[in-house]
Image (cartoon, rainbow, N blue to C red):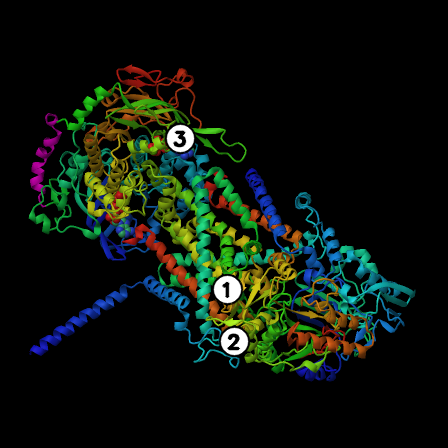
């Protein structure tokens, strides 16, 4: 008897919990699922970048000369490349440079572009004209030429490749930020801040910048992929130190001539780039949504 | 309007001049002697000197600059260091291929971008929306040479539907335009989605519905036209990129094009060609942006006034 | 009277992320043919949603009709598909929206937008539709309609846009016209024009009108019957006279009572309904009004009162009968002139008024502000918008100076120049004897401390991304470099002062109601104990009851902190109530300055007179015979010669056209710039 | 000889023996590379892809067979003067340029003089002429070419396109535009150049002066030969596989095997006569100035394994600076050195280069790093090859670093000697190429790529240049090769095979002396 009530109680309880759980599952919207997925992938990629040796089954420099261009199999889940290296391992090791190249250059470009856009948009007048004309000039110069100039000025190095990519993205970002700043500059709350006595610098940093973020974020997240590829392109045009461990872009561009016989060599690094871009974008979208004060708490 | 256009063109002169000057300085500052490159690695020194003199490279920099500017003003872009051909001929030879590729891929980007963008906005937060969003991101992020080769393998080798290379016919244009347009299409999709969503929640849309207009008219006549503006801006940028940044596509599909020409010229230090190419792409960009702005004012009467 | 529209037991729900939300709860109302019914209620009470439901447009907003029926001419609208209902929209029911600025598609001409609706509903050629559109535009009083047809919304003024909207609504001769706050965005003078137009049109076309407003003055002027809504429910429905004479519901009483009229005794605290309208997701039990109701009983707490017949009207209140009886008493209590009590503030002001005559706090001399109009590359700055043109006046310590005038006359610009948010083109401004325009950067920061501003738009003037605590604390951050808990403590005390709950420190602006947001703006302005506050339309955007709360608050603070106000508004009732002296602006010029009572009693300038006559009076018995000001204000880029008002002045002569009248003293303290003062 | 190898041997039989010739039709050829700057001037274009196309437009005085014997072509016979400084050629009398200009002694003189005229901006052809002095027109069809000193490679060079003949009339007519309007005497003439895209050639109907090794006389079989520039490897293979073109050259190793096995395609391979892709340690820089260290470097490399891996067995290790089919090649040093990691380690250890914790050797705080400068990218998978070397060198504690540079910077650093290692190959049909690579008396008279400044070597190469007796020459070059290998002035890596793949119905493609395809005998089976 006693036993019986206890069990029924338990059954009732677990059923309730089950219902609750189902309810929660249902409430998880598609966007939350996607966000979770994105965060997971990104975290994984970052982990790969930091401690590739924990994850990768082989060493990246292992050249198994008897295993050239083998298609995906159990021992090589993504196949092997033209050196007999394990593609899965390479993708993992390549994440470090690729992430840095993609993310850092976008951030540097965003930073400088924002600075110029902010200055031009906020001060207007002559400063605006000067900055924007210079910006236009930069835009007309081929990226490669700029990159070569940078490499010659600073010497070839991984960081300078990143710098070169960044420079190429500055004009676009400056433009976007400027237009955003101009639209915000005249909003009443900026006047309000001025009326309170807030200095120009603080107005720019504390009031205007946060409101420019959304379009900038879109540009930046979209730019990650092309930065990786441009970076690779530049290292061919004579800007880089050819690394022992290739980044994704390098693998992709080298592997592409094997597409006809070993599609996996180029495809997986390519997918890695695509995945990174998608994931970064989904997260960016979500950040934007959350930064939108109206959506944050309702 | 004419005055506006003139005004805009006048304003662009310093920009073009500035970029030409900057390019001139960069190229001359970069190491590497064009004379040596033409003569080859093992050329005798006297030959190199002779060439340098021939090309005017032994003159002081300011003099070269003055000569160059004066020639440009007169419309004489000089002769290519690499093959002594008038630069203008070399560039003009590439233009049709570049323009047709840019035009078709822009068209592709517009069609796909608008259709997907509108669909995505109308089905906001539903499965279709998510699918479209991921597709658009795929478009934005897919490496072009990988996509290009994939297209060749699928459509040219396996299905044998379309030619992979060449510059002439429309068929030869399809695959490269697709490969080049995909990025633009992805960007536009995102852009159109956003602006359609913004417009769809504007108060005047309610007015339109209150008038009893059908959804179709509301969406296609009013919403879309209002949403066009930001999309057109992106389009301007895209066209610019397609004109000068199609190197990868041109390489994979063995096409002619300004993109490749410029890269080659930079590698060969073919200074006159670089300068002229920048001038031409610069002018094109100005024209494209002008067209964008003019079409703005066509789309949005408010702009017309300030213009 | 045969009912044209019958709403029966209608409920509307919204589908939101957190489940469904009931926005309208079982409301019923009818409109007879040729009748004007006014729907009134505070902001957020569900008026717009009701009207959208009638149009079945609510579905586009994520809402749906969950219960009840809507019948037009006996035909049920609820069951119709969107396609079927769209045949009726614009044809049998038409709607005018609140915001004329945003209710028109910006990229199509006015003409094409009108033609569009005619072609949609009538078998008529494009040309015929065009002819018709032109005649409609002419009918609603738009001059030169042929030209206007080809213009875009941005090329028209607000009043003209609203007229175009009306023309569009009338295009197919609707039987029912729904006008959702058709005049809130407009000036008093234009408002008067539009309202009289609506009345004429109603008579001409035998339409029924559902007029939505929160301005009871308008309701009194226009309505045959009034329906009062509160938090998604109808709480009272009655003929207009009865409602104003004998309001039955405590909410209606409160509303009526919080109106500021020309009769309000200045200095006396304004009546307010305590609290704010509840949010839909958090409705009180029982009667939704009970937390704010002075008569609430236990029953009100638990049971929702139904709408019941009471002496020829319908009321939803358990205590209706009792209150009906009490009503006279209730009013007598405050209206009786005997009970006038000078508030401390008023007494203080009296003193100050005397003292201050020698010592102005703010002295404005010949201030001009011209905005250059850019016209392309080569002729920059040839022409100017003369937003403020040679204005001189002074504000004494401790007084409240009111500044009134139509939209665009330069009030805000003048205010911005005073606060150095805009550089004056010419002239001098002295604050406590200091020249503000000449002073250097250090001085400037100190001046900021002393001079503050409360902005018109409570939402736009606060950074939407900032926490309320940071917004109010910004002055502390800037001037006293306070951070963290020190700042928090200070901010909380200021929040307390303006009646904001200090525990809301971390909330974001959008989580506040309009009234609360305005309090945030005020809190920020008073944080540093300024001497002078410019209130630029600080209450214009608010509801009657909230408006009263804010005005009370401002007066309260003035008294406590010894403040001087420059109060800019176009709502003359409020200005009259709050100001000691008033300046009237027209097209960048000050045309009259006088002590408040003097101005209202003896306006000297013809413009002032016209302004005063345009104020709607919340008394159905005193339907005005006003002379609306003809036409609209000319462009400040090309002001008329001579007296700028001559183009609209009934008394204008050749002299007015040529000679600019000087601001001259016509009686003690009363200046006017008119050749022929009244 | 057996210039056609493996698959080629099979195919030469298949391609030429079976069936009767069906003339006519258009052949489309996917060229690996582009006709740089659209320049088809025989004397100006120094880049291999261009030269490959020009072979069909221009004819040469003589033709060189795979066994390095020289046979008549435009010259029916020739004699060398007793001082070995002059060649007298007797020309064919029936030869006409595409524009109708007769080919005669004047034309020969015009061509050779044109090459050495600085205004022509000739590139490799000027080197092919060596110590050229003048040309004398003896009579209309007899011409005497004079050199300042004996110039042994001349006949071999004369067989190459670089010294092919352009029409004097056309040069005068077109001036600077001649490179875009080439006129020669070849079996094909230009129809149209589409810049950066393709060259269309059509049959020269008057042609009746094929080289003496040709399989037929009269005009070429093909009506039209279209050359499309398809640089991208995957694209080139794809268009061949989908038969959008009938011929593609330089098939990447990964596709070679499959294409060879495919019944629908023919693959012909031939060794490119050249100085092999060689690693040049900067011998003017420490520690590479030490022979022992260079040897240690070399014995750390398993070149054979690396070449097998990267070229998937389609190429062999090269043992000499010269490729095996080259005149004067000596096999004496094949397998003369071995992979010997232990010995490398020992030598380096003895020289004071001590392995650190990171696995790399260092001396006086300086790591043993080899900076390789490069500007060509991964052309022909050469960087891949170096990547494998990097791994191998790591085993002995040497760090190899490839630095990719823009051409200008690269040239600068190379001329300044600011590098440890440079790698390169030099296309040439004669062993005299060694003089260009290793001698201080080469054409540039200053730098050579190997940085050698060795009087003994200079002397040997000078002799080889002057010696006209083939047997003596062979000995000289044998000594030179051995010396270079023993001194480790260069480390040869692999032998490059030029490959041409075609659809099965294409027959009769042959190769000229340095290995470029000849389409004169080619035909398409109907
Ligand atoms: N799309 C929506 N989703 C959820 N809630 C809504 C939506 N639209 C309106 N509401 C809510 O319904 C309530 C009534 O809104 P409504 O617009 O009818 O008010 P109103 O009486 O017209 O006020 P106002 O005078 O400010 O125009 C408000 O609380 C509002 O927040
Ligand atoms: N920055 C500016 N540039 C050009 N014109 C301006 C600017 N600011 C204001 N104006 C013009 O100056 C005139 C006066 O504007 P202001 O805002 O002062 O009017 P207002 O009396 O405050 O009107 P409202 O009651 O609508 O607030 C208007 O015609 C306006 O268009
Ligand atoms: Mg409303
Ligand atoms: Mg204002």
Q: Is residue C439 magenta?
A: no
Residue D370 drawn at (x, y percent)? 57, 68
Q: Is residue C327 magenta?
A: yes
Asked whether, in this view, residue B236 is left or right of residue A212, the answer is right
What distance separates the C-alpha of mark 1 from that of mark 3?
53 Å
Image depth: mark 1 or mark 2 in front? 2
Specify the farthest residue to the right.
D139
Q: Chain of mark 2?
A: D
Mark 1 surroundings within 10 Å by alpha-carbon count, few (fewer than 14), some (14 through 19), many (20 or more): many
What residue is pinned by disc 1?
B143
Instruction: Kindly state the secondary structure of the residue where label 3 is placed.
Output: loop
Q: Are marks 1 and 2 on the same chain?
A: no
Mark seen at residue D395? 2
Mark seen at residue C601? none
Image depth: mark 2 or mark 3 in front? 2
- In the image, which residues are magenta? C318-340
What distance separates the C-alpha of mark 1 from that of mark 2?
36 Å
Q: Residue at x 14, y 26 (%)?
A: C342
What distance separates the C-alpha of mark 2 from that of mark 3?
75 Å
Asked whether, in this view, residue D476 is left or right of residue C139, the answer is right
Q: Nearer the viewer, residue C70 or A203?
A: A203
Q: Nearer the viewer, residue D242 or B270?
A: B270
What residue is pinned by disc 3?
C423
Is the distance from the Cβ of mark 1 to the nearest ligand 1 atom less than 8 Å? no
Q: Is residue A25 positioned above or below D270 on the image?
A: above
Residue C354 drawn at (x, y percent)? 21, 19
Asked whether residue D514 is in view, the answer is yes
Instruction: Kindly state the secondary structure of the residue where label 1 is placed.
Output: loop
Q: Residue at x 9, y 33 (%)?
A: C328
Instruction: Kindly state the secondary structure of the residue where label 2 is placed.
Output: helix
Quadrant of the snapshot with the N terminus of chain B = top right
């Amino acid at each position: 008897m006693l036993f019986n009530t206890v069990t029924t109680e338990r059954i009732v309880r677990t059923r309730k919990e089950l219902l609750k759980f189902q309810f929660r599952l249902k409430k998880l919207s598609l966007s939350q699922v996607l966000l979770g997925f994105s965060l997971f992938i990104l975290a994984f990629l970052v982990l790969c970048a930091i401690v590739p040796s924990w994850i990768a089954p082989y060493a990246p420099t292992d050249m198994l000369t008897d295993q050239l261009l083998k298609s995906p199999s159990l021992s090589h889940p993504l196949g092997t490349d033209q050196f007999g290296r394990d593609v899965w391992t390479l993708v993992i090791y390549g994440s470090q440079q690729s992430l840095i190249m993609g993310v850092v250059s976008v951030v540097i470009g965003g930073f400088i572009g924002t600075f110029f856009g902010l200055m031009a948009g906020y001060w207007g007048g002559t400063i605006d004209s000067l900055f924007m004309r210079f910006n236009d000039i930069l835009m007309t110069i081929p990226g490669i030429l700029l990159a070569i100039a940078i490499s010659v000025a600073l010497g070839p190095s991984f960081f300078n490749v990143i710098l070169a990519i960044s420079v190429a993205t500055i004009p676009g970002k400056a433009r976007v930020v400027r237009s955003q700043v101009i639209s915000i500059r005249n909003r009443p709350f900026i006047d309000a801040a001025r009326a309170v006595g807030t200095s120009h610098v603080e107005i720019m940093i504390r009031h205007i910048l946060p409101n420019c973020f959304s379009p900038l974020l879109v540009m930046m997240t979209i730019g990650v992929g092309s930065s990786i590829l441009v970076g690779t392109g530049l290292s061919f045009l004579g800007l880089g130190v050819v690394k022992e461990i290739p980044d994704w872009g390098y693998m992709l561009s080298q592997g592409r001539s094997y597409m006809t016989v070993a599609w996996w060599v180029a495809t997986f690094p390519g997918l890695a780039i695509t995945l990174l871009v998608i994931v970064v974008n989904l997260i960016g979208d979500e950040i934007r949504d959350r930064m939108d004060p109206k959506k944050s708490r309702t | 309007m004419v005055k506006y256009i003139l005004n805009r063109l006048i304003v662009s002169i310093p920009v073009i001049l500035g970029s030409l000057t900057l390019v001139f300085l960069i190229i001359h500052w970069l190491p590497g002697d064009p004379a040596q490159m033409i003569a080859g690695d093992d050329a005798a020194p006297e030959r190199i000197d002779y060439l340098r003199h021939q090309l005017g490279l032994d003159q002081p920099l300011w003099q070269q600059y003055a000569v160059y500017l004066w020639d440009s003003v007169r419309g004489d872009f000089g002769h290519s260091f690499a093959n002594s051909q008038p630069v203008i001929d070399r560039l003009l030879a590439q233009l049709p291929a570049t323009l047709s590729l840019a035009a078709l891929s822009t068209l592709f980007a517009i069609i796909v971008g608008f259709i997907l963008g509108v669909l995505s906005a109308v089905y906001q937060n539903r499965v279709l929306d998510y699918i479209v969003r991921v597709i658009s991101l795929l478009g934005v992020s897919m490496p072009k040479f990988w996509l290009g080769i994939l297209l060749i393998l699928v459509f040219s080798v396996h299905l044998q539907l379309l030619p992979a290379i060449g510059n002439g016919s429309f068929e030869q244009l399809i695959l490269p335009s697709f490969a080049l347009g995909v990025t633009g299409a992805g960007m536009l999709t995102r852009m159109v989605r956003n602006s359609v969503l913004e417009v769809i929640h504007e108060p005047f849309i309610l007015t339109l519905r209150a008038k009893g207009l059908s959804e179709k008219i509301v969406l296609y006549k009013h919403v879309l036209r209002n949403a066009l503006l930001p999309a057109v801006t992106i389009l301007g940028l895209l066209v610019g990129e397609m004109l000068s940044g199609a190197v990868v596509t041109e390489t994979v599909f063995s096409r002619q094009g300004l993109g490749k020409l410029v890269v080659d010229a930079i590698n060969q230090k073919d200074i006159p060609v670089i300068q002229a190419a920048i001038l031409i792409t610069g002018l094109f960009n100005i024209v494209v942006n002008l067209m964008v702005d003019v079409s703005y004012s066509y789309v949005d009467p408010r702009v017309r006034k300030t213009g | 009277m045969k009912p044209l529209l019958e709403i029966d037991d209608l409920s509307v729900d919204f589908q939101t992320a957190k489940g469904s939300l009931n926005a309208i709860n079982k409301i019923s109302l009818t409109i007879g043919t040729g009748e004007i019914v006014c729907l009134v209620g505070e902001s957020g009470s569900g008026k717009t949603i009701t009207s959208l439901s009638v149009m079945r447009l609510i579905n586009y907003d994520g809402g749906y009709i969950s219960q009840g029926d809507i019948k037009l001419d006996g035909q049920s609208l609820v069951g119709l598909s969107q396609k079927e209902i769209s045949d009726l929209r614009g044809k049998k029911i038409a709607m005018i929206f609140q915001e004329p600025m945003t209710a028109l598609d910006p990229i199509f001409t006015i003409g094409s937008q009108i033609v569009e609706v005619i072609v949609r509903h009538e078998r008529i050629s494009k040309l015929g539709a065009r002819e018709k559109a032109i005649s409609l535009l002419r009918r609603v009083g738009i001059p030169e309609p042929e030209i206007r047809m080809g213009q875009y919304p941005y090329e028209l003024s607000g009043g003209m846009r609203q007229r175009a909207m009306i023309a569009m609504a009338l295009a197919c001769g609707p039987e029912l016209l729904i006008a959702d706050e058709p005049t809130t965005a407009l000036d008093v003078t234009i408002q008067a024009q539009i309202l009289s137009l609506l009345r004429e049109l109603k008579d001409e076309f035998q339409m029924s009108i559902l007029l939505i407003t929160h301005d009871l003055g308008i309701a009194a002027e226009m309505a045959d019957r009034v329906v009062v809504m509160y938090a998604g429910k109808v709480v009272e429905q009655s003929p207009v006279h009865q409602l104003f004479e004998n309001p039955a519901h405590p909410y209606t009483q409160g509303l009526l009572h919080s109106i500021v009229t020309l009769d309000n005794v200045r200095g006396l605290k304004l009546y307010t309904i305590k609290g704010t309208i509840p949010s839909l997701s958090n409705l009180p039990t029982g009667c939704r009004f009970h937390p704010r109701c002075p008569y609430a009983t236990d029953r009100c707490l638990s049971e929702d009162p139904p709408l019941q017949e009471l002496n020829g009207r319908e009321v939803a209140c358990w205590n209706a009968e009792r209150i009906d009886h009490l009503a006279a008493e209730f009013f007598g209590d405050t209206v009786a002139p005997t009970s006038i009590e000078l508030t401390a503030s008023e007494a203080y002001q009296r003193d100050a008024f005397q003292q201050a005559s020698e010592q102005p706090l703010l002295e404005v001399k010949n201030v001009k502000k011209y905005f250059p109009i850019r016209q392309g590359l080569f002729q920059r700055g040839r022409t100017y918008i003369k937003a403020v043109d040679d204005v001189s006046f002074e504000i004494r310590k401790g007084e409240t100076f009111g500044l009134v005038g139509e939209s665009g006359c330069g009030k805000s610009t003048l205010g911005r120049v005073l606060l150095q948010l805009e550089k004056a083109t010419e002239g001098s401004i002295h604050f406590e004897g200091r020249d503000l325009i000449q002073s250097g950067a250090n001085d400037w920061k100190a001046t900021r401390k002393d001079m503050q501003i409360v902005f018109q738009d409570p939402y736009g003037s606060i950074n939407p991304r900032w926490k309320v605590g940071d917004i109010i604390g910004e002055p502390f951050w800037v001037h006293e470099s306070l951070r963290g808990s020190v700042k928090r403590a200070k901010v909380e005390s200021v929040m307390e002062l303006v009646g904001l709950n200090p525990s809301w420190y971390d909330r974001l602006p959008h989580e506040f109601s309009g009234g609360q947001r305005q309090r945030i703006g005020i809190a920020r302005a008073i944080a540093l104990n300024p001497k002078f506050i410019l209130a630029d339309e600080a209450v214009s955007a608010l509801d009657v009851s909230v408006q009263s709360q804010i005005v009370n608050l401002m007066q309260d603070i003035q008294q406590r902190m010894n403040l001087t106000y420059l109060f800019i508004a176009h709502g003359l009732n409020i200005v009259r109530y709050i100001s000691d002296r008033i300046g009237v602006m027209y097209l960048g010029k000050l045309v009259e300055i006088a002590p408040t009572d003097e101005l209202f009693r003896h306006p000297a300038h013809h413009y002032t007179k016209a302004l005063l006559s345009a104020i709607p009076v919340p008394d159905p018995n005193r339907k005005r015979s006003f002379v609306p000001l003809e036409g609209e204000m000319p462009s400040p880029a090309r002001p008329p010669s001579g007296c700028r008002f001559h183009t609209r002045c009934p008394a204008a002569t050749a002299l007015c056209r040529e000679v600019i009248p000087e601001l001259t003293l016509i009686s003690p303290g009363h200046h006017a710039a008119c050749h022929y003062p009244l | 000889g057996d210039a056609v190898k493996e698959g080629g041997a099979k195919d030469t039989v298949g391609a030429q023996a079976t069936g009767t010739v069906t003339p006519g039709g258009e052949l489309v050829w996917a060229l690996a590379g582009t006709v740089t700057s659209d320049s088809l001037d025989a004397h100006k274009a120094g880049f291999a892809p261009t030269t490959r196309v020009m072979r069909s437009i221009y004819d040469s005085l003589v033709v060189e067979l795979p066994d390095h014997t020289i046979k008549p072509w435009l010259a029916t016979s020739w004699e060398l003067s007793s001082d070995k400084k002059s060649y007298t050629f007797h020309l064919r009398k029936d030869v006409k340029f595409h524009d109708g200009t007769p080919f005669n002694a004047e034309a020969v003189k015009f061509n050779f003089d044109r090459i050495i005229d600085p205004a022509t901006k000739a590139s490799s052809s000027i080197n092919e002429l060596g110590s050229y002095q003048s040309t004398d027109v003896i009579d209309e069809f007899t011409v005497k070419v004079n050199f300042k000193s004996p110039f042994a490679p001349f006949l071999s060079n004369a067989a190459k396109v670089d010294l092919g003949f352009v029409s004097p009339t056309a040069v005068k007519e077109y001036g600077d535009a001649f490179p875009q309007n080439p006129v020669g005497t070849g079996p094909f003439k230009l129809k149209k150049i589409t810049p950066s895209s393709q060259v269309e050639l059509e049959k020269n109907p008057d042609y009746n002066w094929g080289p003496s090794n040709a399989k037929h006389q009269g005009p070429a079989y093909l009506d039209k030969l279209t050359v499309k520039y398809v640089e991208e490897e995957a694209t080139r293979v794809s268009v061949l596989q989908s038969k959008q073109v009938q011929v593609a050259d330089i098939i990447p190793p990964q596709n070679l095997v499959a294409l060879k096995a495919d019944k629908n395609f023919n693959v012909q391979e031939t060794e490119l006569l050249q100085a092999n892709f060689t690693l040049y340690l900067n011998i003017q820089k420490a520690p590479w100035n030490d022979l022992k260290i260079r040897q240690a470097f070399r014995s750390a490399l398993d070149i054979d394994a690396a070449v097998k891996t990267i070229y998937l067995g389609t190429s062999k290790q090269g043992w000499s600076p010269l490729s095996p089919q080259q005149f004067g090649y000596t096999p004496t040093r094949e397998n003369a050195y071995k992979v010997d990691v232990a010995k490398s380690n020992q030598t380096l250890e003895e020289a004071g280069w001590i392995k650190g914790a990171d696995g790399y050797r260092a001396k006086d705080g300086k790591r043993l790093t080899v900076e390789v400068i490069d500007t060509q990218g991964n052309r022909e998978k050469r960087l891949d090859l170096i990547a494998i070397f990097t791994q191998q060198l790591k085993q002995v504690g040497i760090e190899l670093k490839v630095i990719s540079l823009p051409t200008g910077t690269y040239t600068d650093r190379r001329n300044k000697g600011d590098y440890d290692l440079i790698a390169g190959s030099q296309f040439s049909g004669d062993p005299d190429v060694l003089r260009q690579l290793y001698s201080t008396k080469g054409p540039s008279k200053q730098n050579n790529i190997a940085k050698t400044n060795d009087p003994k070597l200079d002397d040997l190469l000078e002799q080889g240049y002057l010696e006209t007796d083939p047997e003596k020459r062979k000995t000289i070059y044998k000594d030179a090769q051995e010396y270079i290998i023993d001194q480790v002035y260069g480390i040869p890596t692999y032998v490059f095979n030029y490959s041409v793949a075609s659809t099965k119905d294409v027959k009769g493609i042959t190769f000229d002396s340095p290995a470029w395809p000849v389409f004169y005998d080619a035909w398409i089976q109907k």
